Image (spheres, rainbow, N blue to C red):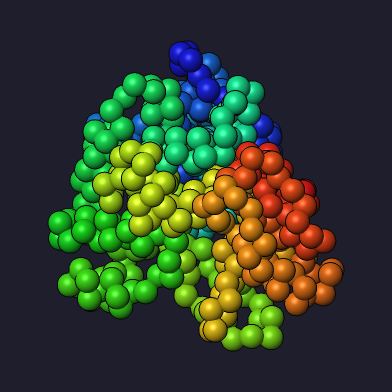
Amino acid sequence: MVKAYLHRWIESSLQAYLKEFPVVGLMGPRQSGKSTTLQYLLGAQYKYVSFDSPSQRERAQGDPELLLDELGERVIFDEIQYVPSLLSYLKIRVDQRRDIPGQYVITGSQQFSLMKGLTETLAGRIGLLCQLPFASLEELEAKKIKKSSKDLFVQYSLRGSYPELVAHPKKDVGAWYESYVNTYLERDVQGIYQIGHLRDFRRFLILLASRCGQIFNMSSFANDVGVSVPTIQQWASILEASWIIYFLQPYHENFGKRIVKSPKLYFLDTALAAQLVGIDNAKFLMQGPMAGALFENYIVSETLKCYRNRGKIPRLYYWRTSIGLEVDLLMEEGGRVYPVECKLAKTVRSSMAETLEKFVSSLPQERVGKGRVVCLCEESISFSHNVSFMNGLDYFKNLEPHHTG
C-alpha cells in the first residue's frame, strides 16, 4: 500500500477503461505518478513488472512466452518502451480471450514510437490514457487552497507539480530537477535514442527553456547550437515524445487573414523551464525578463494537464496573423473556439482585452465563445459582451470551455 497517496483525476477514466478494453495503456512523462497510481488502485488484483529493471527486460526479451505463462492475466507492465517486442505476444494472448476486459495494463514514457507500436499491434484492443504531473489547482489544491493567483503561479513555477516534489515539500528543488534532467539524458535520450552529443543536446534544452512561449524556429536553434536543422528537428521530436515540451499548433482555419503556420513552444512543467534558465526565487520570477513568457507557459501547460488528467484530449491552438495580431490560446469544442489571453498583471486595463475584442467580433457568433483574459486580478469580472477578465483560480475552476464566465 502506498502511503499518503494523493488521488488523481485519471482514476475514474482508468477504472472505466479497465471494464471496456482488454489492454489499458497509461502514458506520461517519467515521475508523473503512473506507477504509484496503478499500484494503489490495482496492486491487490494485478501483478507488477517493471522494465526499468535490466533483469526483467532480459527475461521479456529472452523468453517472452515463458514470462507471460508465469504471470498469467492481470499484469501491469511498467515502462513497456524498453521491450516493444512484447506487444505482439500480448496481442496473441488477448486475441485468445478477446471478450475479457482488463487483462493487461501497460505504461510508457515515450510517446510517438511507442504509440505507433501500440496502435498498430493492439488496434481495437487497447484504450489509451495520459497522466501528466498534477494539475495545480483543481487536482491538487481544490479543497484546501486559500492562495491568490499570484501565489499559485509562483509556487508551481518554482516547485513544479511532479508528485515527488508535491509529496515532499522540503525536498531540494534544484537538486531534484538536476537529477531528473541527468537521468532523462542518460536513460532515455542516450539509452533509447543513442544521441551522441549529449552536451549539445543539453544546450538545446536550455535554449528551449529560454524561448518558451515563442514560435519554434528550427533554423534559429540550429545556428545557435551549431548543428543541422534535421538534428534540431530530431531532438525536438524526442523531447516532445518524452512529454518534456509541448508544441501548440496554429489554428487550422483561415479567418480571412494570412496566418503564421509554425507551432509555439511550451514546457509541460513550468518549473523545469525556470530551473533550466536559473530562475529559483519569486523576485526573479516576477520581475525578470521571462516573467510574461513563464506565466503564459503556466496557463497553457496547466490547461493541457487539466484536460489530459481527466482522460480527455483537448483541441488547443494559438492564432497569429502575419501582421502580428495574436491570441495566445484557443480551445475548440462543439464547433466553437474559446479564445484566451495570458497577462501577467494585477491591474485590469481595457487595452488588455483589445485583441480578444477584435477576434471575437470578427467571427460569426455561432463560431466563437466569450474570450477570457487570464491575469492576476483579485476578482473576475465580465468586461464586455465578448470578454471577461479572470484570475487564475477562477479560470482553472471553470476550465471547461462552455463555462465562459
Give how far across and how far down residue 32 sits, in percent: 44, 36
Q: Please, is residue 394 above or below residue 374 in the view?
A: above
Please, is residue 35 above or below residue 43 in the view? below
Q: Residue at x 56, y 30 (%)?
A: 147
Q: How many marks?
A: 0
Question: In this view of the protein, can residue 92 be seen by the observer?
Answer: no
Left or right, 108 with respect to 340, comes to left
Vertical side of 157 occupied by 402: above or below: below
Q: Eyeballing the image, is 108 above or below 40?
A: below
Q: Between residue 80 and residue 322, name the one nearer to us.
A: 322
Q: Residue at x 57, y 47 (%)?
A: 346
| Picture coordinates of residue 348, whole percent (x, y) | 64, 53
**What residue appears at the point 64 percent right and 23 percent down from the top-left corner?**
143
Residue 320 is situated, as x and y percent measured from the top left of the image, at 56, 75
User: Where on the picture, by quarter, is residue 144?
Assistant: top right
The residue shown at (24%, 37%) is 179
The front one of 169 and 376 is 376
* Residue 218 visible in the picture: yes
In the rendered image, which quarter is residue 9 located in? top right
From the top left corner, tell me how far across and down residue 270 is, in percent: 42, 46
